[in-house]
Image (cartoon, helix red, strand yellow):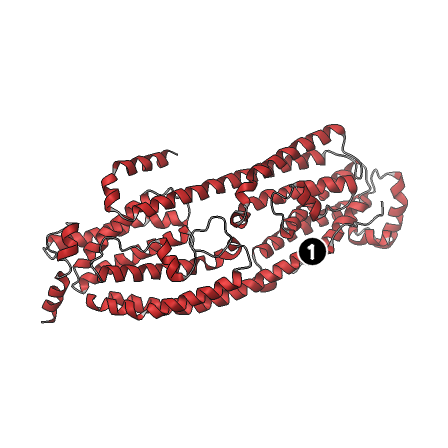
Amino acid sequence: MSESFASVDPEIFAKVQEQIEKDSEIKEKIREALRNLDKEVRKINSTLSRIHIVPAEHVLKLTDSVEDGFKQVAVEIGGLVEIVKDYPYYKYNGLWTRDLQNTAFLVLLHGWLKRSYGTAESGNSLLSIDEVGAVLGVPVNLKTEDRFHLTIEEYLHAVISLVDELTRLTTNAVTQRDFLRPLMINRFVKDIHSSFQVLNLKNDSLRRRSDSLKYSVKKVEDVSYDLMLRGLVPDGTEDAKQSEDVKEVPEVILEGKKE
Amino acid sequence: MATAKIQHAAKGASNAAYINNPILAMFNYFRDELDEHHDRRERVIKASRDITALSKKMIFTLQRARNLLAPLPASLDKEYQTRHSQIQALFSSIAPDLQDLNAHRYARQISGGIQEYIEALSFHHYLLTGSLIPLASVRDNVRNLIEITPADYILGIFDLVGEIMRFGITMIATRGDVSKLLRDIRELRMQFEALDTSVGGGGLLGKEVSKKMGVMQTCVEKVETAVCGFIVRGSERPKGWVPELAIERAVGGGRGGNFDEDGET
Protein backbone atom coordinates (compact mmCIF):
# COMPACT_ATOMS: atom_id res chain seq x y z
CA MET A 1 0.00 0.00 0.00
CA SER A 2 2.90 2.34 0.27
CA GLU A 3 3.96 2.76 -3.35
CA SER A 4 3.85 6.44 -4.10
CA PHE A 5 1.84 8.23 -6.74
CA ALA A 6 4.63 7.62 -9.19
CA SER A 7 3.10 8.86 -12.37
CA VAL A 8 2.39 12.44 -11.47
CA ASP A 9 4.33 13.96 -14.27
CA PRO A 10 5.87 17.22 -13.12
CA GLU A 11 6.56 18.02 -16.77
CA ILE A 12 2.86 18.43 -17.43
CA PHE A 13 2.42 20.85 -14.59
CA ALA A 14 5.46 22.76 -15.72
CA LYS A 15 4.00 22.91 -19.20
CA VAL A 16 0.68 24.23 -17.99
CA GLN A 17 2.45 26.77 -15.80
CA GLU A 18 4.46 27.83 -18.80
CA GLN A 19 1.29 28.15 -20.83
CA ILE A 20 -0.37 30.31 -18.20
CA GLU A 21 2.65 32.59 -18.13
CA LYS A 22 3.01 32.73 -21.88
CA ASP A 23 -0.68 33.50 -22.16
CA SER A 24 -0.38 36.59 -20.05
CA GLU A 25 2.81 37.63 -21.79
CA ILE A 26 1.20 37.49 -25.21
CA LYS A 27 -1.86 39.25 -23.92
CA GLU A 28 0.32 42.07 -22.70
CA LYS A 29 1.94 42.34 -26.12
CA ILE A 30 -1.44 42.30 -27.83
CA ARG A 31 -2.70 45.05 -25.57
CA GLU A 32 0.37 47.07 -26.36
CA ALA A 33 -0.25 46.67 -30.10
CA LEU A 34 -3.90 47.56 -29.61
CA ARG A 35 -2.92 50.73 -27.79
CA ASN A 36 -0.89 51.77 -30.81
CA LEU A 37 -3.74 50.93 -33.13
CA ASP A 38 -6.13 52.80 -30.92
CA LYS A 39 -4.04 55.96 -31.18
CA GLU A 40 -4.36 55.98 -34.96
CA VAL A 41 -8.01 55.04 -34.86
CA ARG A 42 -8.73 57.88 -32.47
CA LYS A 43 -7.11 60.41 -34.77
CA ILE A 44 -9.22 59.29 -37.70
CA ASN A 45 -12.29 59.15 -35.54
CA SER A 46 -11.90 62.70 -34.32
CA THR A 47 -11.27 63.99 -37.83
CA LEU A 48 -14.23 62.15 -39.33
CA SER A 49 -16.54 63.18 -36.53
CA ARG A 50 -16.21 66.71 -37.88
CA ILE A 51 -18.59 65.69 -40.66
CA HIS A 52 -21.33 66.54 -38.23
CA ILE A 53 -20.32 70.15 -37.97
CA VAL A 54 -18.93 71.18 -41.35
CA PRO A 55 -20.87 72.06 -44.50
CA ALA A 56 -21.32 69.28 -47.03
CA GLU A 57 -18.74 70.58 -49.47
CA HIS A 58 -16.00 70.24 -46.88
CA VAL A 59 -16.61 66.60 -46.18
CA LEU A 60 -14.45 65.33 -49.00
CA LYS A 61 -11.54 67.35 -47.66
CA LEU A 62 -11.96 65.55 -44.38
CA THR A 63 -12.02 62.15 -46.02
CA ASP A 64 -8.89 63.02 -48.00
CA SER A 65 -7.09 64.10 -44.89
CA VAL A 66 -7.44 60.71 -43.21
CA GLU A 67 -6.17 58.61 -46.12
CA ASP A 68 -2.71 58.48 -44.61
CA GLY A 69 -4.17 57.62 -41.26
CA PHE A 70 -5.69 54.48 -42.72
CA LYS A 71 -2.32 53.49 -44.11
CA GLN A 72 -0.91 53.83 -40.62
CA VAL A 73 -3.80 51.77 -39.27
CA ALA A 74 -2.91 48.98 -41.69
CA VAL A 75 0.68 49.15 -40.45
CA GLU A 76 -0.44 48.86 -36.82
CA ILE A 77 -2.66 45.93 -37.64
CA GLY A 78 0.30 44.35 -39.38
CA GLY A 79 2.18 44.69 -36.09
CA LEU A 80 -0.63 42.93 -34.27
CA VAL A 81 -0.71 40.15 -36.85
CA GLU A 82 3.02 39.69 -36.36
CA ILE A 83 2.52 39.09 -32.63
CA VAL A 84 -0.30 36.58 -32.95
CA LYS A 85 0.51 34.83 -36.18
CA ASP A 86 2.01 31.79 -34.45
CA TYR A 87 -1.05 31.16 -32.32
CA PRO A 88 -4.50 29.87 -33.21
CA TYR A 89 -6.57 32.81 -34.41
CA TYR A 90 -9.51 32.15 -32.15
CA LYS A 91 -7.36 31.79 -29.08
CA TYR A 92 -6.91 35.51 -28.59
CA ASN A 93 -9.30 37.12 -31.02
CA GLY A 94 -11.61 38.17 -28.20
CA LEU A 95 -8.96 40.69 -27.23
CA TRP A 96 -9.02 42.65 -30.44
CA THR A 97 -12.41 41.97 -31.93
CA ARG A 98 -13.80 45.20 -30.47
CA ASP A 99 -10.96 47.28 -31.83
CA LEU A 100 -11.21 45.61 -35.19
CA GLN A 101 -14.95 46.29 -35.35
CA ASN A 102 -14.32 49.89 -34.52
CA THR A 103 -11.61 50.20 -37.14
CA ALA A 104 -13.76 48.50 -39.75
CA PHE A 105 -16.53 50.95 -38.90
CA LEU A 106 -14.26 53.89 -39.69
CA VAL A 107 -13.28 52.28 -42.97
CA LEU A 108 -16.95 51.87 -43.83
CA LEU A 109 -17.77 55.43 -42.83
CA HIS A 110 -14.87 56.76 -44.83
CA GLY A 111 -15.95 54.76 -47.85
CA TRP A 112 -19.55 55.84 -47.48
CA LEU A 113 -18.64 59.51 -47.24
CA LYS A 114 -16.36 59.32 -50.26
CA ARG A 115 -18.99 57.64 -52.39
CA SER A 116 -21.94 59.65 -51.17
CA TYR A 117 -20.38 63.10 -51.22
CA GLY A 118 -18.19 62.42 -54.20
CA THR A 119 -19.09 61.06 -57.58
CA ALA A 120 -22.71 60.37 -58.36
CA GLU A 121 -22.20 56.74 -57.50
CA SER A 122 -25.21 56.69 -55.24
CA GLY A 123 -26.03 53.08 -56.06
CA ASN A 124 -24.03 51.33 -53.41
CA SER A 125 -22.19 53.26 -50.78
CA LEU A 126 -21.42 50.30 -48.57
CA LEU A 127 -17.92 48.94 -48.87
CA SER A 128 -18.03 45.18 -49.12
CA ILE A 129 -16.27 43.00 -46.59
CA ASP A 130 -13.50 42.38 -49.11
CA GLU A 131 -12.99 46.10 -49.63
CA VAL A 132 -12.74 46.66 -45.90
CA GLY A 133 -10.27 43.80 -45.64
CA ALA A 134 -8.20 45.36 -48.39
CA VAL A 135 -7.99 48.70 -46.57
CA LEU A 136 -6.99 47.01 -43.33
CA GLY A 137 -4.57 44.73 -45.13
CA VAL A 138 -6.06 41.51 -43.78
CA PRO A 139 -7.89 38.59 -45.40
CA VAL A 140 -11.59 38.17 -44.68
CA ASN A 141 -13.76 35.27 -43.58
CA LEU A 142 -11.20 32.49 -43.67
CA LYS A 143 -12.78 29.09 -43.34
CA THR A 144 -10.00 26.66 -42.75
CA GLU A 145 -6.74 28.54 -42.81
CA ASP A 146 -5.79 29.49 -39.28
CA ARG A 147 -4.67 33.04 -39.85
CA PHE A 148 -5.58 36.57 -38.80
CA HIS A 149 -8.67 37.81 -40.62
CA LEU A 150 -11.74 39.99 -40.46
CA THR A 151 -14.77 37.89 -39.57
CA ILE A 152 -18.27 38.35 -40.92
CA GLU A 153 -19.54 39.16 -37.46
CA GLU A 154 -16.98 41.90 -37.03
CA TYR A 155 -17.94 43.36 -40.37
CA LEU A 156 -21.64 43.26 -39.51
CA HIS A 157 -21.02 44.99 -36.20
CA ALA A 158 -19.20 47.69 -38.11
CA VAL A 159 -22.15 48.04 -40.49
CA ILE A 160 -24.50 48.62 -37.57
CA SER A 161 -22.13 51.23 -36.15
CA LEU A 162 -22.17 52.89 -39.54
CA VAL A 163 -25.94 53.06 -39.48
CA ASP A 164 -25.85 54.59 -36.01
CA GLU A 165 -23.39 57.20 -37.17
CA LEU A 166 -25.39 58.04 -40.30
CA THR A 167 -28.53 58.36 -38.23
CA ARG A 168 -26.79 61.04 -36.28
CA LEU A 169 -25.55 62.61 -39.50
CA THR A 170 -29.11 62.86 -40.76
CA THR A 171 -30.07 65.42 -38.16
CA ASN A 172 -26.79 67.27 -38.40
CA ALA A 173 -26.93 67.42 -42.18
CA VAL A 174 -30.26 69.17 -41.89
CA THR A 175 -28.67 71.69 -39.57
CA GLN A 176 -26.08 72.28 -42.29
CA ARG A 177 -28.90 72.84 -44.79
CA ASP A 178 -27.82 69.69 -46.58
CA PHE A 179 -31.22 68.24 -47.44
CA LEU A 180 -29.87 65.71 -49.86
CA ARG A 181 -28.08 63.60 -47.27
CA PRO A 182 -31.15 62.61 -45.26
CA LEU A 183 -32.68 61.15 -48.41
CA MET A 184 -29.56 59.21 -49.28
CA ILE A 185 -29.24 57.97 -45.74
CA ASN A 186 -32.91 57.09 -45.67
CA ARG A 187 -32.53 54.80 -48.61
CA PHE A 188 -29.24 53.39 -47.44
CA VAL A 189 -30.45 52.58 -43.94
CA LYS A 190 -33.52 50.89 -45.35
CA ASP A 191 -31.36 48.72 -47.58
CA ILE A 192 -29.21 47.74 -44.64
CA HIS A 193 -32.23 47.04 -42.51
CA SER A 194 -33.85 44.79 -45.09
CA SER A 195 -30.52 43.07 -45.71
CA PHE A 196 -30.21 42.22 -42.04
CA GLN A 197 -33.62 40.61 -42.27
CA VAL A 198 -32.21 37.78 -44.37
CA LEU A 199 -29.76 36.75 -41.67
CA ASN A 200 -30.68 34.04 -39.19
CA LEU A 201 -29.09 35.59 -36.17
CA LYS A 202 -28.72 33.78 -32.90
CA ASN A 203 -29.50 35.51 -29.68
CA ASP A 204 -26.15 37.21 -29.40
CA SER A 205 -24.76 40.71 -29.35
CA LEU A 206 -25.13 41.03 -33.10
CA ARG A 207 -28.78 40.17 -32.85
CA ARG A 208 -29.40 42.69 -30.12
CA ARG A 209 -27.61 45.42 -32.00
CA SER A 210 -29.35 44.63 -35.26
CA ASP A 211 -32.66 44.95 -33.46
CA SER A 212 -31.84 48.60 -33.00
CA LEU A 213 -31.71 49.15 -36.76
CA LYS A 214 -35.45 49.68 -36.97
CA TYR A 215 -35.22 52.66 -34.65
CA SER A 216 -32.59 54.16 -36.91
CA VAL A 217 -34.83 53.57 -39.90
CA LYS A 218 -37.69 55.31 -38.15
CA LYS A 219 -35.61 58.25 -37.04
CA VAL A 220 -34.23 58.85 -40.52
CA GLU A 221 -37.67 58.40 -42.05
CA ASP A 222 -39.12 61.00 -39.72
CA VAL A 223 -36.53 63.54 -40.79
CA SER A 224 -37.04 62.79 -44.48
CA TYR A 225 -40.78 63.05 -44.02
CA ASP A 226 -40.54 66.41 -42.34
CA LEU A 227 -38.29 67.71 -45.09
CA MET A 228 -40.64 66.54 -47.80
CA LEU A 229 -43.69 67.83 -46.06
CA ARG A 230 -42.20 71.27 -46.07
CA GLY A 231 -41.08 71.01 -49.66
CA LEU A 232 -37.44 71.31 -48.70
CA VAL A 233 -36.43 68.52 -51.06
CA PRO A 234 -37.07 68.53 -54.79
CA ASP A 235 -39.61 65.98 -55.97
CA GLY A 236 -39.56 63.73 -52.97
CA THR A 237 -38.58 60.12 -52.97
CA GLU A 238 -37.75 59.12 -56.51
CA ASP A 239 -34.40 57.44 -56.38
CA ALA A 240 -33.60 57.85 -60.04
CA LYS A 241 -34.17 61.57 -59.93
CA GLN A 242 -32.38 61.80 -56.69
CA SER A 243 -29.06 60.80 -58.12
CA GLU A 244 -29.19 63.39 -60.88
CA ASP A 245 -31.07 66.37 -59.53
CA VAL A 246 -29.90 66.10 -56.09
CA LYS A 247 -26.28 66.81 -56.87
CA GLU A 248 -27.03 70.43 -57.61
CA VAL A 249 -29.46 71.03 -54.83
CA PRO A 250 -27.19 71.41 -51.84
CA GLU A 251 -24.97 73.90 -53.60
CA VAL A 252 -27.93 76.09 -54.38
CA ILE A 253 -29.14 75.89 -50.87
CA LEU A 254 -25.74 76.46 -49.43
CA GLU A 255 -25.14 79.47 -51.59
CA GLY A 256 -28.49 80.73 -50.58
CA LYS A 257 -27.44 80.44 -47.02
CA LYS A 258 -24.22 82.33 -47.49
CA GLU A 259 -25.88 85.26 -49.08
CA MET B 1 -36.85 26.71 -38.37
CA ALA B 2 -40.12 28.50 -38.77
CA THR B 3 -38.55 31.91 -38.80
CA ALA B 4 -35.98 30.75 -41.30
CA LYS B 5 -38.72 29.62 -43.62
CA ILE B 6 -40.60 32.87 -43.29
CA GLN B 7 -37.50 34.81 -44.08
CA HIS B 8 -36.74 32.70 -47.09
CA ALA B 9 -40.28 33.18 -48.31
CA ALA B 10 -40.09 36.90 -47.73
CA LYS B 11 -36.92 37.00 -49.74
CA GLY B 12 -38.52 35.24 -52.66
CA ALA B 13 -41.51 37.52 -52.59
CA SER B 14 -39.53 40.71 -52.77
CA ASN B 15 -37.47 40.05 -55.83
CA ALA B 16 -37.89 43.62 -56.97
CA ALA B 17 -36.39 44.88 -53.75
CA TYR B 18 -33.60 42.42 -54.26
CA ILE B 19 -32.52 44.04 -57.48
CA ASN B 20 -32.80 47.52 -56.02
CA ASN B 21 -30.78 46.55 -53.01
CA PRO B 22 -27.19 45.86 -54.03
CA ILE B 23 -26.20 44.95 -50.51
CA LEU B 24 -28.56 42.02 -50.36
CA ALA B 25 -26.41 39.66 -52.40
CA MET B 26 -23.57 40.00 -49.93
CA PHE B 27 -25.91 39.46 -47.02
CA ASN B 28 -27.29 36.31 -48.57
CA TYR B 29 -23.76 35.01 -48.68
CA PHE B 30 -23.31 36.03 -45.05
CA ARG B 31 -26.43 34.17 -44.10
CA ASP B 32 -25.13 30.94 -45.53
CA GLU B 33 -21.79 31.39 -43.86
CA LEU B 34 -23.28 32.28 -40.50
CA ASP B 35 -25.76 29.42 -40.68
CA GLU B 36 -22.92 27.04 -41.29
CA HIS B 37 -21.08 28.44 -38.31
CA HIS B 38 -24.11 28.26 -36.02
CA ASP B 39 -24.91 24.71 -37.09
CA ARG B 40 -21.38 23.62 -36.47
CA ARG B 41 -21.38 25.31 -33.11
CA GLU B 42 -24.64 23.60 -32.16
CA ARG B 43 -23.24 20.22 -33.15
CA VAL B 44 -20.18 20.79 -31.01
CA ILE B 45 -22.25 21.91 -28.04
CA LYS B 46 -24.52 18.92 -28.36
CA ALA B 47 -21.62 16.48 -28.64
CA SER B 48 -19.96 18.10 -25.66
CA ARG B 49 -23.13 17.72 -23.60
CA ASP B 50 -23.55 14.11 -24.62
CA ILE B 51 -19.94 13.36 -23.84
CA THR B 52 -20.35 15.00 -20.44
CA ALA B 53 -23.47 12.97 -19.67
CA LEU B 54 -21.87 9.70 -20.72
CA SER B 55 -18.72 10.47 -18.77
CA LYS B 56 -20.78 11.13 -15.68
CA LYS B 57 -22.44 7.76 -16.10
CA MET B 58 -19.02 6.15 -16.46
CA ILE B 59 -17.99 7.78 -13.22
CA PHE B 60 -21.12 6.55 -11.42
CA THR B 61 -20.33 3.07 -12.62
CA LEU B 62 -16.79 3.36 -11.33
CA GLN B 63 -17.95 4.68 -7.97
CA ARG B 64 -19.81 1.42 -7.50
CA ALA B 65 -16.53 -0.47 -7.49
CA ARG B 66 -15.34 -1.42 -4.03
CA ASN B 67 -11.71 -2.23 -4.50
CA LEU B 68 -8.75 -0.14 -5.39
CA LEU B 69 -6.02 -1.71 -7.51
CA ALA B 70 -8.27 -4.49 -8.71
CA PRO B 71 -9.93 -5.13 -12.05
CA LEU B 72 -13.53 -3.96 -12.26
CA PRO B 73 -16.23 -6.57 -11.71
CA ALA B 74 -17.42 -7.88 -15.07
CA SER B 75 -20.79 -6.15 -15.01
CA LEU B 76 -19.29 -2.76 -14.17
CA ASP B 77 -16.58 -3.22 -16.73
CA LYS B 78 -19.15 -3.94 -19.40
CA GLU B 79 -21.11 -0.80 -18.55
CA TYR B 80 -17.95 1.23 -18.56
CA GLN B 81 -16.79 -0.08 -21.91
CA THR B 82 -20.16 0.49 -23.56
CA ARG B 83 -20.21 4.14 -22.53
CA HIS B 84 -16.62 4.50 -23.49
CA SER B 85 -17.15 3.34 -27.03
CA GLN B 86 -20.19 5.64 -27.30
CA ILE B 87 -18.00 8.55 -26.32
CA GLN B 88 -15.34 7.56 -28.78
CA ALA B 89 -17.98 7.47 -31.49
CA LEU B 90 -19.07 10.99 -30.49
CA PHE B 91 -15.52 12.23 -30.67
CA SER B 92 -15.03 10.85 -34.13
CA SER B 93 -18.34 12.29 -35.29
CA ILE B 94 -17.42 15.76 -34.11
CA ALA B 95 -13.77 15.66 -35.14
CA PRO B 96 -14.32 17.13 -38.63
CA ASP B 97 -15.92 20.19 -37.03
CA LEU B 98 -12.89 20.78 -34.88
CA GLN B 99 -10.09 20.92 -37.40
CA ASP B 100 -7.70 23.71 -38.37
CA LEU B 101 -9.14 27.12 -37.71
CA ASN B 102 -12.13 25.65 -35.94
CA ALA B 103 -10.14 23.79 -33.32
CA HIS B 104 -9.95 26.92 -31.24
CA ARG B 105 -13.09 28.55 -32.50
CA TYR B 106 -15.20 26.04 -30.61
CA ALA B 107 -12.68 25.22 -27.89
CA ARG B 108 -14.90 26.75 -25.25
CA GLN B 109 -17.85 24.65 -26.39
CA ILE B 110 -16.09 21.28 -26.41
CA SER B 111 -13.81 21.83 -23.45
CA GLY B 112 -16.45 20.85 -20.86
CA GLY B 113 -16.96 17.48 -22.50
CA ILE B 114 -13.25 16.85 -22.81
CA GLN B 115 -12.64 17.67 -19.17
CA GLU B 116 -15.41 15.41 -17.95
CA TYR B 117 -14.13 12.64 -20.18
CA ILE B 118 -10.60 12.99 -18.82
CA GLU B 119 -12.04 12.87 -15.33
CA ALA B 120 -13.74 9.56 -16.07
CA LEU B 121 -10.77 8.14 -17.90
CA SER B 122 -8.28 9.10 -15.20
CA PHE B 123 -10.54 7.78 -12.45
CA HIS B 124 -10.77 4.44 -14.22
CA HIS B 125 -7.04 4.36 -14.65
CA TYR B 126 -6.53 5.23 -11.01
CA LEU B 127 -8.84 2.54 -9.70
CA LEU B 128 -7.12 -0.10 -11.76
CA THR B 129 -3.50 0.91 -11.37
CA GLY B 130 -3.33 3.36 -8.51
CA SER B 131 -1.51 5.83 -10.68
CA LEU B 132 -2.24 8.92 -12.69
CA ILE B 133 -3.03 8.46 -16.34
CA PRO B 134 -0.40 10.06 -18.58
CA LEU B 135 -1.51 12.67 -21.12
CA ALA B 136 -0.25 10.48 -23.97
CA SER B 137 -2.62 7.73 -22.95
CA VAL B 138 -5.57 10.16 -22.88
CA ARG B 139 -4.66 11.18 -26.39
CA ASP B 140 -4.58 7.54 -27.45
CA ASN B 141 -8.05 7.11 -26.07
CA VAL B 142 -9.49 9.76 -28.34
CA ARG B 143 -7.36 8.26 -31.09
CA ASN B 144 -5.75 11.64 -31.66
CA LEU B 145 -8.85 12.81 -33.50
CA ILE B 146 -9.18 15.78 -31.24
CA GLU B 147 -6.49 17.93 -29.79
CA ILE B 148 -6.08 17.43 -26.06
CA THR B 149 -3.93 20.18 -24.63
CA PRO B 150 -1.98 19.94 -21.38
CA ALA B 151 -4.45 22.51 -20.07
CA ASP B 152 -7.46 20.27 -20.81
CA TYR B 153 -5.62 17.45 -19.13
CA ILE B 154 -4.82 19.37 -15.98
CA LEU B 155 -8.37 20.70 -15.71
CA GLY B 156 -9.70 17.15 -15.99
CA ILE B 157 -7.29 15.92 -13.33
CA PHE B 158 -8.51 18.64 -10.98
CA ASP B 159 -11.89 16.95 -11.01
CA LEU B 160 -10.30 13.56 -10.47
CA VAL B 161 -9.51 14.66 -6.93
CA GLY B 162 -13.24 15.01 -6.28
CA GLU B 163 -13.90 11.50 -7.52
CA ILE B 164 -11.10 10.04 -5.44
CA MET B 165 -12.59 11.89 -2.50
CA ARG B 166 -16.00 10.32 -2.99
CA PHE B 167 -14.48 6.93 -3.44
CA GLY B 168 -12.37 7.46 -0.33
CA ILE B 169 -15.29 8.53 1.84
CA THR B 170 -17.20 5.42 0.81
CA MET B 171 -14.15 3.33 1.56
CA ILE B 172 -13.80 4.77 5.03
CA ALA B 173 -17.42 4.01 5.69
CA THR B 174 -17.16 0.44 4.50
CA ARG B 175 -13.69 -0.87 5.04
CA GLY B 176 -11.18 1.58 6.20
CA ASP B 177 -7.72 2.03 4.86
CA VAL B 178 -7.54 5.09 2.69
CA SER B 179 -3.95 6.01 3.42
CA LYS B 180 -2.90 5.54 -0.19
CA LEU B 181 -5.83 7.61 -1.41
CA LEU B 182 -5.09 10.38 0.98
CA ARG B 183 -1.42 10.38 0.13
CA ASP B 184 -2.16 10.52 -3.56
CA ILE B 185 -4.59 13.38 -3.48
CA ARG B 186 -2.32 15.31 -1.19
CA GLU B 187 0.46 14.88 -3.67
CA LEU B 188 -1.81 16.09 -6.43
CA ARG B 189 -2.84 19.00 -4.29
CA MET B 190 0.76 20.01 -3.80
CA GLN B 191 1.35 19.88 -7.54
CA PHE B 192 -1.75 21.90 -8.23
CA GLU B 193 -0.94 24.47 -5.63
CA ALA B 194 2.43 25.04 -7.21
CA LEU B 195 0.63 26.46 -10.23
CA ASP B 196 0.74 30.21 -10.15
CA THR B 197 -2.38 31.64 -11.74
CA SER B 198 -1.91 35.21 -10.66
CA VAL B 199 0.50 36.19 -13.44
CA GLY B 200 -0.69 39.23 -15.31
CA GLY B 201 -4.27 38.91 -14.20
CA GLY B 202 -4.40 35.39 -15.54
CA GLY B 203 -5.95 34.37 -18.82
CA LEU B 204 -8.95 32.18 -19.36
CA LEU B 205 -6.90 29.17 -18.30
CA GLY B 206 -5.63 30.96 -15.22
CA LYS B 207 -9.17 31.78 -14.16
CA GLU B 208 -10.41 28.26 -14.69
CA VAL B 209 -7.49 26.84 -12.75
CA SER B 210 -8.05 29.12 -9.79
CA LYS B 211 -11.75 28.28 -9.77
CA LYS B 212 -11.04 24.57 -9.65
CA MET B 213 -8.29 25.04 -7.11
CA GLY B 214 -10.71 25.90 -4.33
CA VAL B 215 -12.96 22.94 -5.04
CA MET B 216 -9.98 20.62 -5.14
CA GLN B 217 -8.68 21.90 -1.79
CA THR B 218 -12.07 21.37 -0.19
CA CYS B 219 -12.10 17.79 -1.48
CA VAL B 220 -8.74 17.00 0.04
CA GLU B 221 -9.83 18.53 3.31
CA LYS B 222 -13.00 16.49 3.34
CA VAL B 223 -11.01 13.28 3.15
CA GLU B 224 -8.65 14.54 5.83
CA THR B 225 -11.56 15.39 8.09
CA ALA B 226 -13.20 12.05 7.43
CA VAL B 227 -10.02 10.21 8.31
CA CYS B 228 -9.64 12.33 11.39
CA GLY B 229 -13.20 11.64 12.47
CA PHE B 230 -12.71 7.98 11.90
CA ILE B 231 -9.62 7.89 14.04
CA VAL B 232 -11.15 9.92 16.81
CA ARG B 233 -14.21 7.76 17.01
CA GLY B 234 -12.17 4.68 16.26
CA SER B 235 -15.15 2.74 15.09
CA GLU B 236 -15.11 -0.49 13.19
CA ARG B 237 -11.59 -0.22 12.02
CA PRO B 238 -10.07 -3.25 10.38
CA LYS B 239 -7.55 -5.06 12.43
CA GLY B 240 -4.53 -4.49 10.29
CA TRP B 241 -4.87 -0.79 10.75
CA VAL B 242 -4.95 -0.54 14.50
CA PRO B 243 -1.23 -0.37 15.23
CA GLU B 244 -0.69 2.46 12.78
CA LEU B 245 -3.54 4.24 14.36
CA ALA B 246 -2.10 3.88 17.83
CA ILE B 247 1.12 5.55 16.73
CA GLU B 248 -0.82 8.25 15.07
CA ARG B 249 -2.82 9.13 18.12
CA ALA B 250 0.28 9.36 20.19
CA VAL B 251 2.07 11.62 17.73
CA GLY B 252 -0.54 13.56 15.92
CA GLY B 253 -3.02 14.01 18.71
CA GLY B 254 -5.81 12.98 16.38
CA ARG B 255 -5.32 15.84 13.97
CA GLY B 256 -6.17 14.50 10.57
CA GLY B 257 -3.88 17.08 9.02
CA ASN B 258 -0.59 15.34 9.60
CA PHE B 259 -1.31 11.84 10.65
CA ASP B 260 -0.38 10.41 7.33
CA GLU B 261 3.04 11.79 6.69
CA ASP B 262 4.13 10.98 10.20
CA GLY B 263 2.95 7.45 9.93
CA GLU B 264 4.48 6.65 6.60
CA THR B 265 7.78 8.37 6.32
Q: Position of residue B145 (x, y in %)?
A: 61, 42
At 72% from the left edge and 49% from the top edge, which residue is drawn?
A: B220
Residue A257 in which image quadrant: bottom left
Q: Is residue B9 left or right of residue B212?
A: left
Percent from the top left, x then y, of residue B22? 27, 48
Q: Residue at x 69, y 56 (%)?
A: A13
Question: Which of these two is toward me, A242 or A168?
Answer: A242
Q: Residues within 10 Å of mark 1 (few under 14, many from 20)?
A: some
B56 above or below A169?
above
Residue B197 visible in the displayed image? no
Q: Nearer the viewer, residue A122 or A104?
A: A122
Left or right, A252 with respect to A222, comes to left
The C terminus of chain B: image quadrant: bottom right
The local secondary structure at tag 1 comes to helix
Query: Does residue A87 appear to the left or right of A200 in the view shown?
Result: right
Residue sitting farthest toward the top: B75
User: Whole-percent x and y of residue A129?
Assistant: 36, 54
Q: Is residue A204 left or right of residue B251?
A: left
| Residue B240 visible in this rendered orientation of the protein | yes
Location of the N terminus of chain B by quadrant is top left
Question: Could you say where residue B148 lies in the image, as x and y percent from the top left?
Answer: 63, 48
Q: Residue at x 27, y 69 (%)?
A: A62
Chain containing mark 1: A
The amino acid type of the residue labelled 1 equals: Phe
Task: Name the residue carrying label 1.
Answer: A13
Q: Is residue B265 above or below residue A59?
A: above
**How many discs mark residues in the rendered view?**
1
A248, above or below B138, in the image: below
Going 68% across and 43% down the picture, which residue do you hit?
B140
